[in-house]
Image (cartoon, rainbow, N blue to C red):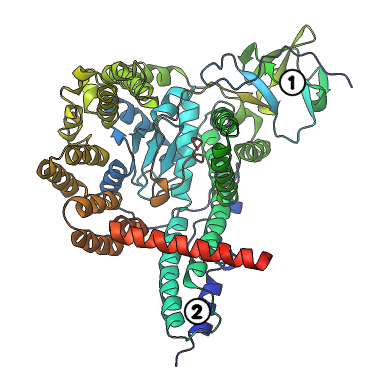
């Protein structure tokens, strides 16, 4: 099986060292292929790649009108941002994440407590 | 004679997982999550009795370790956005405001009073107004869809279960229940069923709140990509980072024999948290939202994000100063023993930022650590940083009073410690979250009789905190006896198992 050589970065998990945004998977997870476009905002795709042939993560070179610029085998393409999951920079820590949530009657937050 | 067995069995059956879930609507659990779509009209808003919103703010100042951060410029901006959200939902006159909660985690939550609490970390992390509006819309979704009813139902069920446990214990002692399992066993079983049921329903409410946010924000002209999608992606990245940190910690534990025991208990706890979690995995939420977004007209999805006004607020004088100060405080608190911890904490308390609970506690903890590490000069004025917060009425946090009272008591200055606790409790006694710590303090430094009486009042006034208050009022002698019995039971069980094995 051919694996597309899309310019990729290193693994994502260095707490404060996340730099440029990267594509980590297709979205939703069940998506089987991704469309590639010649320019941002184009209506018609020029190529379609099966999901299993992509090596993640993929570096994002630029972003415009809901499209992301990527490099595929030395050629520049654009893909729809809505069709991929992006890893984004986070400014947070677990230094003072403690709350007495288990005793309280407020709605659970936007997400569970990540600082376990 | 009353047939305890039959009636208890009936009540317990009503509290089973299936009944709790099946009875969700009739018990008052808010709008059915499956009815929320990304595009159609929202279900009509339901009338309700609103909790007092000022009391709600005081509750948070008592609940959150580092209190709230009052930042008028930032609050005004966020409240302007919140008003737009309410207007779009058709309820412009509903109560509720936005507040900044001093938590370093990516945190945002709403209360039944309609207030939304968001951490500085989200303010620093979000990339556009679209994302902040999406986060607030998600939280407002919990309010609009009346999802706080789930918590009320949980408290009601807990109270009912307490009575059943008591009834079972009495019946057992009077031999009314032949072969009935011990009350403790019921309590454990009930608690497990409740957590699974509540977790299951809570998860579906989170997905509904995501769709609610998608529905509202796209109609308001905000981008899906920079809004709902962005906050879920930030959340997912944050979870990835923490999973990596957790794995590193567990790998270190696995290197030693004693560490392996700790690791085993962590794994059991994590397994249980996974089963009972009220939040679905973020990746599942992202998938659900991505599929729901397919129904939204494309012209509503690809809007240009609103970045300038959001960045202007973040970089404006007092807001930028607060965000920087908070960052220094978190650096200090991350490791109070670090060489530069005290310096970072002092930077966080520069100027008027010294009134915030986070900077007051950061300075106190790092200064104490420095003094304990042998830096004699650091002990000068130890504890004074806490007064800056206590003296600022709008900023004072319950935890600051507790920290100061405990510090003074340990120094042997019990009258001064009690005076601090009296003042703090007089201010915060209407907030249930203040009671467990006050009860424990008065038990330790005044009398356990007073602590028991306070625990009884607390249980009556704040049912959700009954357990915490009762636990706080347990005397050292009672605690020793409970530990002895637990050990005895464990030994008996082990002996029984050993005999059986033979």
Residue B110, given in percent of the width and then of the height, sits at 41, 44
User: Residue lying farthest right?
Assistant: A1
Looking at this view, is B73 or B319 the one in front? B319
Q: Residue at x 49, y 53 (%)?
A: B44
Hey, which quadrant is residue B197 in on the image? bottom right
Which residue is the site of mark 1?
A43
Looking at this view, is B126 or B187 the one in front? B187
Q: Residue at x 31, y 30 (%)?
A: B76
Hey, which quadrant is residue A56 in on the image? top right
- Taking the image as drawn, is residue B65 in sight? yes
Which quarter of the rendering shows the N terminus of chain B?
bottom left
Looking at this view, is B500 or B30 the one in front? B500
| Cα–Cα span, label 2 and label 1 | 66 Å
Residue B446, given in percent of the width and then of the height, sits at 16, 54
Q: Residue at x 72, y 34 (%)?
A: A29
Chain identity of mark 2? B
Q: Is residue B430 above or below residue B15?
A: above
Which residue is the site of mark 2?
B8
User: Could you tell whether B416 is left or right of B430 in the image?
Assistant: left
- Taking the image as drawn, is residue B32 in sight? no
Residue B142, given in percent of the width and then of the height, sits at 47, 47
Please say if the residues under marks 2 and 1 sit with CB atoms less than 8 Å apart. no
User: Could you tell whether B147 is left or right of B326 in the image?
Assistant: right
Q: Residue at x 60, y 47 (%)?
A: B271
């Amino acid at each position: 099986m051919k694996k597309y050589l899309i310019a990729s970065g290193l693994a994502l998990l260095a707490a404060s060292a996340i730099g440029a945004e990267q594509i980590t998977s297709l979205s939703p997870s069940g998506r089987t292929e991704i469309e590639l476009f010649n320019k941002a905002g184009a209506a018609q795709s020029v190529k379609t790649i099966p999901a299993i042939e992509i090596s993640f993560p993929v570096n994002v070179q630029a972003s415009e009108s809901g499209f992301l610029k990527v490099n595929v085998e030395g050629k520049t393409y654009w893909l729809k941002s809505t069709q991929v999951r992006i890893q984004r920079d986070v400014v947070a820590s677990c230094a003072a994440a403690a709350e007495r949530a288990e005793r309280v009657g407020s709605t659970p937050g936007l997400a569970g407590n990540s600082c376990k | 004679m009353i047939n305890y067995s039959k009636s208890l069995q009936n009540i317990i059956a009503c509290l089973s997982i299936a009944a709790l879930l099946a009875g969700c609507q009739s018990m008052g659990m808010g709008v059915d999550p499956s009815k929320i779509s990304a595009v159609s009209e929202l279900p009509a808003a339901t009338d309700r009795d609103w909790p007092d919103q000022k009391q709600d703010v005081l509750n948070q100042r008592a609940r959150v370790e580092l209190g709230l951060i009052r930042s008028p410029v930032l609050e005004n901006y966020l409240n302007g956005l919140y008003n737009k959200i309410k207007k779009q939902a058709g309820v412009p006159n509903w109560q509720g405001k936005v507040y900044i909660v001093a938590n370093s985690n990516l945190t945002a939550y709403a209360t039944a009073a309609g207030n939304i609490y968001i951490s500085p970390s989200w303010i620093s992390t979000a990339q556009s107004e679209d994302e902040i509006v999406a986060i607030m819309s998600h939280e407002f979704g919990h309010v609009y869809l009346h999802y706080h009813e789930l918590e009320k139902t949980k408290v009601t069920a807990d109270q009912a279960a307490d009575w059943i446990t008591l009834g079972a214990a009495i019946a057992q002692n009077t031999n009314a229940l032949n072969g009935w399992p011990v009350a403790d066993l019921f309590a454990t079983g009930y608690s497990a069923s409740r957590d699974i049921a509540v977790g299951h329903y809570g998860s579906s409410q989170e997905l509904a709140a995501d769709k609610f946010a998608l529905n509202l924000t796209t109609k308001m002209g905000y981008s899906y990509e920079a809004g709902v999608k962005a906050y879920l992606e930030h959340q997912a990245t944050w979870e990835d980072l923490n999973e990596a940190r957790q794995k590193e910690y567990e790998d270190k534990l696995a290197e030693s024999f004693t560490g392996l025991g700790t690791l085993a208990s962590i794994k059991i706890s994590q397994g249980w948290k996974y089963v009972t979690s009220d939040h679905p995995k973020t990746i599942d939420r992202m998938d659900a939202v991505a599929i729901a977004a397919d129904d939204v007209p494309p012209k509503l999805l690809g809007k240009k994000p609103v970045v300038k006004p959001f960045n202007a607020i973040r970089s404006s004088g007092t807001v930028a100063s607060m965000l920087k100060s908070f960052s220094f405080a978190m650096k200090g608190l991350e490791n109070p023993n670090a060489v530069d911890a005290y310096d970072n904490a002092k930077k966080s308390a520069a100027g008027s930022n010294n009134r915030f609970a986070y900077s007051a506690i950061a300075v106190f903890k790092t200064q104490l650590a420095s003094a304990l590490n042998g830096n004699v000069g650091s002990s000068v004025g130890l504890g004074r940083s806490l007064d800056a917060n206590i003296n600022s009425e709008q900023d004072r946090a319950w935890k600051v009073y507790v920290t100061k009272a405990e510090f003074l008591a340990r120094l042997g200055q019990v009258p001064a410690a009690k005076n601090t606790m009296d003042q703090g409790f007089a201010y915060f006694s209407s907030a249930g979250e203040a009671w467990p710590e006050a009860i424990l303090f008065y038990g330790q430094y005044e009398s356990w009789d007073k602590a028991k009486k306070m625990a009884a009042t607390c249980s009556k006034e704040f049912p959700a905190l009954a357990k915490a208050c009762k636990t706080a009022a347990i005397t050292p002698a009672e605690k020793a006896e409970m530990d002895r019995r637990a050990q005895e039971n464990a030994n008996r069980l082990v002996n029984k198992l050993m005999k059986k094995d033979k």
